[in-house]
C-alpha cells in the first residue's frame, strides 16, 4: 500500500469500493426498510414518522429527476455520499494524526460490513448521517485546535449547518452536541470556548435546520418523538441481552475490525485529555473519544434494562473510532510486527469481499437454494431483499388491478412497503394494523368508504380473513401469489378480496380521522 501516496491509496479505495457497490446495487432488490422508504418517499413531507426527512427527500428528488424507481438509481446518491464519507474520514484522520493515519482510517471504514454495505449503499438515514457527522467534526477540529484554527462566525455557522443536516438525517446526530460539549468541559485548554458565542451559534443554526421536524411533529402529536422514545423504555434487568447486543455490534462491524476499534477507543479514553496544550495528539484522541462514547455506551446499556435496540444504532460512535485505529495501524506498520498488520488488512479485505460475493449472488440468484438446501431451509435472510414485482402480472391476469376504486390492504408496514413499491404507486396501499408507521399518514381511511380492497400478505402470517372482517362487509380468499426469483417460487402471499370497506380502522399513536 505504501507504494502509493496516502491520497492515492484512498482514491483507489473509493474507486474500487464504489464500483463494487454499484454492482451490488444493480443486482439486488430493495430490502424491507428500503422498499418502505422508497414507497413512503413518493409523498413529500416536512418529516416522517420513523426518522427525520433528509434521506426521504433524497429519494423523492432522485425519483422526480430521473422518473425511475430502479434500485440502482435510487441507491446512487447514497453510494456517492459514502464515497464522500470515505474522503472526509481521510481528511479527519490526516488533520489529527497525519496522512497515513487518515488513509488507514478510510480504508478500515470500508472494510467494516455495517459501514461498507448498509451505510454505503442502502436507502437508510445512516448514509447522509455519517457524511454530515464527519463534515461537522472536521469543521469543529478546524475551529477548536490552534494548528488549524479559523475561529470565526462563518466557521461556527458551517459547523451548525452540518450538524443541522445531520439532525435532518437521524436523531443520533444529537450525540455530536453532547460529545463536543463533553470535550470542551473536560479539556482545560479548550474550556474557554464555552465562554464564546461560537458553540451556541452552531447549536442555534442546527436548531433552525431542524425546524421542519419540529413543525411536523407538532402537527402530528409528536408521534415520531414518542415512537423513538418508547424504544428506550426499560422493562427490567437483562445481562444476557447486553451480551447479545455487544455480540451483535461485533458481528455488524465484523469482529476482526470491532476488537481493534474497541482497543483504540479504550486506549484514547483511558489516557484522558492533555491539559498542557490546546492541540496535541492526545487532545485529538480525546476529542474523538468524547464523540464516540455516547452512542456506544447509551445503546449498549439500554439493552441491559431490556430496551429495544438494533445493532447498527451504535455505528455513529464507532465512526469516530476509525481515526484512532488508523493512527495505531500507521504506527504499527513502522515496527517489526508490520507484517502481521499487513496480513490482517489483506485478510480483512478478502473476507469482506468473499462475504459480499456470497450474499450478493445469493440475493440476486438464490443459487444456494439448490446447492445447499439444508442450509437455506433454516432461513434465508436475502429473501428480505427480494422485490415482489412478480405478483403484479398475476394480479393483472386476474383483472384485479383494473377495477375502479380498488385499493390494497397490508397487515404489516413491511408488507405494505413491499407491496407499494412493487405496485409503483398505482394503487393506494393502507396498512391495517396497530403499527402502520408512516402509512398511517398517507391516506385517510374515510376516503375509501364503500370501496373494495385486495388484502395481500405473507401466507405464513396471513392465513385467515378473521382480523379483517370487522372492517368490510365480506372477505373471501382468492388464493396465493408466488413471489419468484429467476422463475423459482421463493415465498407465497395470501390474496383476499374484501368488499365494501366501512371507512375506518383502529388508528395507532392517538390519531383521529378528521
Image (cartoon, grey):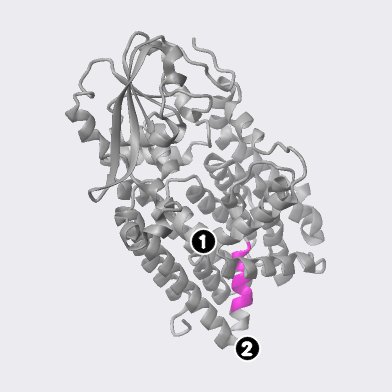
Label annotation for residue 435: none
Q: Residue at x 19, y 24 (%)?
A: 399
Magenta highlight: main SS = helix
Q: Which residue has dot 1 on it?
A: 88
Which residue range is magenta in the image?
321-329
x, y (%) of residue 147?
66, 67
* Left or right of 80 in this view: 188: right
Q: Are marks 1 and 2 in contact (CB under 8 Å)?
A: no
Question: Which image quadrant for residue 428?
Answer: top left
Q: Residue furthest bottom?
A: 336
Label 1 or label 2, whichever comes before in sequence order: 1
Residue 324 can be seen, yes or no: no
Q: Which residue is mark 2?
A: 335
Asked if residue 326 is among those painted magenta in the image, a careful observer would answer yes
Q: Is residue 369 above or below residue 332?
A: above
Task: Give the image quarter of residue 288.
Answer: bottom right
Please tell me which residue is depicted at 59% across the width and 18% down the height of the picture.
510
Vertical relation: 169 (above or below) 89: above
Which x, y percent locates residue 350? 44, 74
How far from the left and from the top, in percent, is residue 362? 35, 58
Label 1, label 2: how far apart the Cα atoms are: 27 Å
Q: Position of residue 294 (x, y in %)?
A: 70, 51
Give yes or no for residue 75 being in the magenta stretch.
no
* Nearer-the-camera pick, 406 or 72: 406
Residue at image coords 41%, 34%: 415
* Left or right: residue 194 compared with residue 53: right
Identify the element where label 1 is drawn: helix
Say whether residue 28 is visible.
Answer: yes
Q: Residues within 10 Å of mark 2 (few under 14, many from 20)?
A: few
> SS for tag 2?
loop
Amino acid at each position: 500500500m505504501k507504494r502509493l501516496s496516502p491520497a492515492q491509496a484512498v482514491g483507489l479505495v473509493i474507486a474500487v469500493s464504489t464500483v463494487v457497490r454499484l454492482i451490488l446495487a444493480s443486482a439486488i432488490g430493495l430490502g424491507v426498510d428500503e422498499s418502505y422508504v422508497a414507497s413512503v418517499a413518493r409523498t413529500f413531507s416536512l418529516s416522517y414518522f420513523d426518522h427525520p426527512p433528509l434521506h426521504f427527500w433524497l429519494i423523492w428528488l432522485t425519483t422526480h429527476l430521473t422518473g425511475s424507481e430502479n434500485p440502482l438509481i435510487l441507491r446512487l446518491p447514497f453510494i456517492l455520499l459514502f464515497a464522500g464519507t470515505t474522503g472526509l474520514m481521510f481528511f479527519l484522520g490526516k488533520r489529527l494524526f497525519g496522512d497515513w493515519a487518515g488513509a488507514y482510517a478510510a480504508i478500515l471504514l470500508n472494510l467494516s460490513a455495517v459501514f461498507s454495505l448498509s451505510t454505503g449503499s442502502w436507502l437508510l438515514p445512516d448514509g447522509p448521517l455519517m457524511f454530515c457527522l464527519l463534515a461537522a467534526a472536521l469543521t469543529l477540529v478546524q475551529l477548536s485546535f490552534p494548528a488549524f484554527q479559523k475561529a470565526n462566525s462563518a466557521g461556527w455557522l458551517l459547523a451548525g449547518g452540518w450538524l443541522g443536516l445531520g439532525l435532518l438525517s437521524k436523531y443520533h446526530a444529537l450525540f455530536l452536541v453532547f460529545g463536543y460539549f463533553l470535550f470542551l468541559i473536560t479539556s482545560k485548554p479548550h474550556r474557554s470556548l464555552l465562554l464564546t458565542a461560537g458553540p451556541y451559534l452552531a447549536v442555534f443554526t442546527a436548531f433552525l435546520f431542524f425546524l421542519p421536524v419540529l413543525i411536523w411533529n407538532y402537527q402530528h402529536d409528536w408521534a415520531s418523538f414518542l415512537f423513538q422514545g418508547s424504544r428506550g423504555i426499560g422493562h427490567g434487568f437483562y445481562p444476557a441481552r447486553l451480551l447479545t447486543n455487544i455480540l451483535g455490534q461485533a458481528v455488524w462491524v465484523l469482529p476482526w475490525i470491532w476488537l481493534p476499534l474497541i482497543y483504540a477507543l479504550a486506549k484514547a479514553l483511558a489516557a484522558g485529555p492533555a491539559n498542557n496544550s490546546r492541540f496535541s495528539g492526545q487532545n485529538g484522541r480525546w476529542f474523538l473519544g468524547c464523540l464516540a462514547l455516547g452512542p456506544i455506551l447509551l445503546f449498549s446499556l439500554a439493552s441491559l434494562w431490556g430496551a429495544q435496540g438494533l445493532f447498527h444504532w451504535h455505528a455513529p460512535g464507532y465512526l469516530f473510532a476509525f481515526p484512532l485505529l488508523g493512527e495505531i495501524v500507521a504506527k504499527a506498520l513502522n515496527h517489526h510486527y508490520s507484517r502481521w498488520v499487513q496480513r490482517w488488512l489483506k485478510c480483512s479485505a478478502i473476507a469482506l469481499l468473499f462475504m459480499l460475493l456470497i450474499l450478493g449472488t445469493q440475493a440476486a440468484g438464490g443459487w444456494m437454494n439448490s446447492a445447499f438446501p439444508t442450509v437455506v431451509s433454516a432461513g434465508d435472510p436475502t429473501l428480505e431483499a427480494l422485490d415482489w414485482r412478480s405478483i403484479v402480472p398475476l394480479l393483472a391476469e386476474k383483472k384485479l388491478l383494473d377495477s375502479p376504486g380498488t385499493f390494497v390492504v397490508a397487515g404489516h408496514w413491511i408488507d405494505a412497503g413491499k407491496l407499494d413499491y412493487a405496485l409503483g404507486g398505482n394503487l393506494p396501499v393502507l396498512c391495517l394494523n396497530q403499527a402502520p408507521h408512516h402509512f398511517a399518514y398517507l391516506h385517510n381511511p374515510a376516503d375509501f368508504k364503500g370501496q373494495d380492497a385486495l388484502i395481500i400478505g405473507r401466507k405464513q402470517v396471513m392465513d385467515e380473513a378473521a382480523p379483517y372482517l370487522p372492517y368490510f362487509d365480506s372477505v373471501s380468499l382468492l388464493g396465493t401469489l408466488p413471489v419468484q426469483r429467476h422463475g423459482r417460487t421463493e415465498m407465497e402471499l395470501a390474496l383476499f378480496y374484501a368488499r365494501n370497506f366501512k371507512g375506518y380502522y383502529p388508528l395507532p399513536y392517538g390519531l383521529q380521522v378528521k
